Image: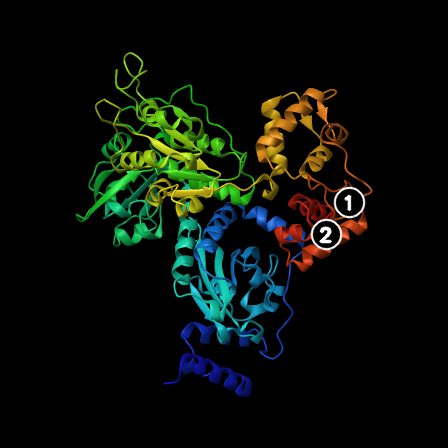
């Protein structure tokens, strides 16, 4: 038998000579796709030019798909980190094959084949022939299109791994794709892309049914919080609303379809199950044929009382749900993942530059968890080394010189039933890291000189340090990092976020609700570099509210506080704060748009090329649309 590459090569020659490929030389999916391309009237020797939608239509579609797009972007960043090496691109397209977002290595972006692979490109089979995005959209299942499997030779040096994403209604809602040059392809990419697609689907499922009762279950407890767990959404009467694909597999054909009842599938009484779920994190569940599962109710505090169930403790009136602005799609996906992890009491590690809002996100996680206890913040860098253990775990009376009468409970006990936020975790002494690691093994507090006790704590940590470097230098334990980062997220710096205006308005509302910002003032502020991120923006806005004349902050007032732009500086040059002169002239706008096009419609790359902020590129594109 011929090797795969020879078979495809022979199929190509036969296609060019006879107008149709031999079926026996190609996989069934590729053969069928080639035949569809022929029926579309496509000619391998005369590929049509790529088709693009206008920037306005692209933004409109990105906004329409904001939920799935936010989840996809979060997974794309994770996926890009997981796939080692270079010459890789991660892409997300809508159900029609319209490419909405890409994350790529510089080596991939600079390659000749990347010129037509940019947001706004339409990747339907009828236009681009056999390709990962278009063929997966048609098949509605995962596909690998390698090298000459592509119908057009311009893509023959690419390997594309694509997986469909389905919404809670079972309809195709997007396509995730990982592409590389054929030499850089990796065997595990297909599994990683499939896992990422499932993660997005589960995120959509949870978001769609956040107002319903969400049940996660698996026949092995260690898999309860993994992608293989089944998810069921039911209403307050026990009516099944939806089940994810894993649930259908685990239940082996039992009637778990919408409209059936909980009692049609499980032997446990629904009200009893809910009551137990309020008091226990996990419980046993038996289906109608006797299969045993470990289950959890993910959102016990988010639905009303079920008739026959006991009443839970009301939430503390002291805890007010904080607002964490996350209009930026990447941030929206990140926040949703944090909310889900908090509801499951999974340790969360938040990374990010100083001032990006790590504590605010931690407080949001606490609120999303529905926990009744307190939110207890601890700055690890501010505690003396000799007192950190006593501060965290408490101490008995007389445990050491200076111990107060009666002893102290410690911050972990204070956070019992709530959330402990360990800020600047990278500055924790190595000796205490071993103690913290032991605590995470059994969630038991051992006060200095006292009796150990178990606590129920959601642990959220944060750092702006490079923990990987600290581990390499022996300053931080790798095994502790693995316990702290069950979910790890990184907050984008303010200069890279697309929701600057929303953040500024949110902050000004908190500082002084009687004051407002004009659009020109926001645009002027957005031109600054914001090395101190949201914290620096808050400080500047506070100064502006003290200087405002009336109740409106305009561009002139901003200039009086931060300094005017330098109008005589050539476009593209930057001062210490990286600002450009306001009011883009036509030649300046053309300069931006040229750089944007040459960067493959990549806003970050265009901004780096010009040495300006991303918001400058956004404004130029917005001005172009009128």
Residue 466 coordinates in the image, percent (x, y) = 46, 43
Residue 355 coordinates in the image, percent (x, y) = 55, 34
Question: Would you identify the image quadrant in which residue 43 lies?
Answer: bottom right
Is residue 471 shown above or below 324? below
Q: What sort of colour scheme is used for the picture?
A: rainbow
Numbered badge on residue 503: none
Looking at marks 2 and 1 on the same chain, the residue that comes earlier in the sequence is marked by 1
* Residue 476 appears anywhere in the view: yes
Callout 1: 10 Å neighbours few (<14), some, many (20+)? some
Of 423 and 308, nearer the camera is 423
Q: Secondary structure at mark 2?
A: helix
Of 36 and 435, nearer the camera is 435
Check if mark 2's residue and mark 1's residue have beta carbons within 8 Å: yes
Q: So how many labels did they put on this image?
A: 2
Residue 184 coordinates in the image, percent (x, y) = 47, 67
Q: Residue furthest bottom?
A: 17
Question: Would you identify the image quadrant in which residue 197 lies?
Answer: bottom left
Residue 423 coordinates in the image, percent (x, y) = 44, 32
Q: Quadrant of the N terminus?
A: bottom left
* Residue 169 appears anywhere in the view: no
Q: Secondary structure at mark 1?
A: loop
Is residue 135 shown above or below 277? below
Say which residue label 1 marks: 584
Question: Would you identify the image quadrant in which residue 42 lies?
Answer: bottom right
Say which residue label 2 marks: 592
* Left or right of 211 in this view: 239: left
Is residue 183 shown above or below 521? below
Of 451 and 215, nearer the camera is 451
Q: CA distance from mark 2 to mark 1?
A: 10 Å
């Amino acid at each position: 038998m011929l090797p795969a590459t020879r078979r495809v090569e022979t199929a190509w020659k036969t296609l060019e000579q006879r107008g149709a490929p031999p079926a026996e030389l190609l996989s069934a999916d590729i053969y069928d796709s080639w035949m569809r391309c022929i029926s579309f009237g496509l000619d391998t020797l005369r590929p049509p030019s790529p088709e693009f939608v206008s920037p306005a239509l692209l933004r409109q579609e990105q906004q329409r798909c904001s939920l799935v797009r936010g989840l996809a972007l979060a997974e794309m960043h994770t996926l890009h980190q997981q796939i080692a090496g270079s010459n890789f691109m991660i892409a997300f397209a809508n159900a029609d094959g319209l490419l909405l977002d890409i994350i790529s290595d510089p080596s991939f972006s600079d390659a000749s084949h990347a010129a037509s692979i940019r947001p706004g490109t339409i990747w339907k089979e009828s236009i681009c022939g056999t390709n990962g995005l278009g063929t997966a959209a048609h098949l509605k299942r995962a596909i690998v299109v390698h090298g000459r499997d592509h119908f057009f030779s311009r893509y023959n040096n690419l390997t594309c791994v694509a997986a469909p994403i389905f919404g809670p209604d079972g309809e195709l809602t997007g396509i995730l794709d990982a592409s590389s040059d054929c030499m850089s392809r990796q065997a595990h990419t297909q599994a990683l892309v499939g896992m990422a697609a499932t993660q997005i689907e589960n995120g959509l499922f949870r978001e769609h049914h956040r107002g319903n009762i969400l049940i996660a279950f698996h026949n092995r407890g260690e898999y309860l919080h993994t992608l293989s767990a089944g998810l069921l959404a039911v209403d307050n009467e026990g009516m099944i609303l939806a089940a994810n694909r894993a649930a259908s597999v685990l239940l082996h054909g039992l009637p778990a379809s919408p409209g059936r009842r909980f009692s049609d599938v499980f032997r446990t009484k629904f009200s009893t199950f809910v009551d137990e779920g309020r008091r226990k994190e996990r419980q046993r569940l038996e289906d109608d044929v006797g299969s045993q599962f470990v289950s959890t109710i993910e959102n016990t505090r988010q639905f009303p009382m079920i008739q026959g169930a006991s009443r839970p403790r009301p939430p503390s009136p002291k805890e007010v749900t904080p607002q964490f602005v996350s209009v930026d799609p990447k941030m929206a996906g990140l926040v949703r993942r944090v909310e889900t992890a908090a509801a499951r009491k999974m340790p969360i590690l938040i990374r990010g530059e100083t001032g990006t809002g790590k504590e605010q996100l931690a407080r949001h996680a606490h609120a999303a968890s529905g926990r009744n206890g307190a939110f207890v913040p601890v700055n690890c860098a501010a505690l003396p080394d000799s007192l950190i253990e006593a501060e965290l775990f408490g101490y008995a009376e007389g445990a050491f010189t200076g111990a107060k009468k009666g002893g102290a409970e410690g911050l972990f006990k204070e956070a019992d039933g709530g959330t402990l936020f360990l800020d600047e975790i990278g500055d924790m002494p190595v000796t205490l890291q071993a103690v913290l690691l032991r605590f995470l093994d059994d969630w038991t507090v051992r006060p200095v000189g006292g009796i150990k006790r178990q606590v129920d704590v959601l642990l959220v940590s944060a750092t702006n340090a490079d923990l990987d470097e600290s581990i390499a230098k022996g300053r931080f334990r790798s095994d502790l990092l693995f316990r702290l980062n069950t979910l790890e997220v990184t907050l984008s710096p303010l200069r890279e976020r697309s929701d600057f205006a929303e953040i500024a308005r949110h902050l000004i509302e908190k500082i002084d609700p009687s004051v407002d910002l004009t659009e020109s003032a926001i645009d002027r502020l957005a031109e600054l570099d914001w090395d101190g991120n949201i914290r620096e923006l808050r400080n500047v806005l506070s100064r502006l509210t003290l200087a405002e004349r009336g109740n409106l902050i305009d561009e002139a007032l901003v200039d009086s506080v931060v300094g005017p732009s330098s109008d005589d500086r050539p476009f593209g040059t930057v001062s210490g704060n990286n600002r450009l002169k306001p009011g883009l002239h036509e030649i300046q706008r053309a300069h931006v748009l040229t750089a944007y096009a040459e960067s493959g419609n990549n806003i970050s790359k265009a901004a780096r090329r010009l040495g300006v902020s991303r918001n400058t590129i956004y404004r130029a594109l917005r001005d172009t649309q009128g």
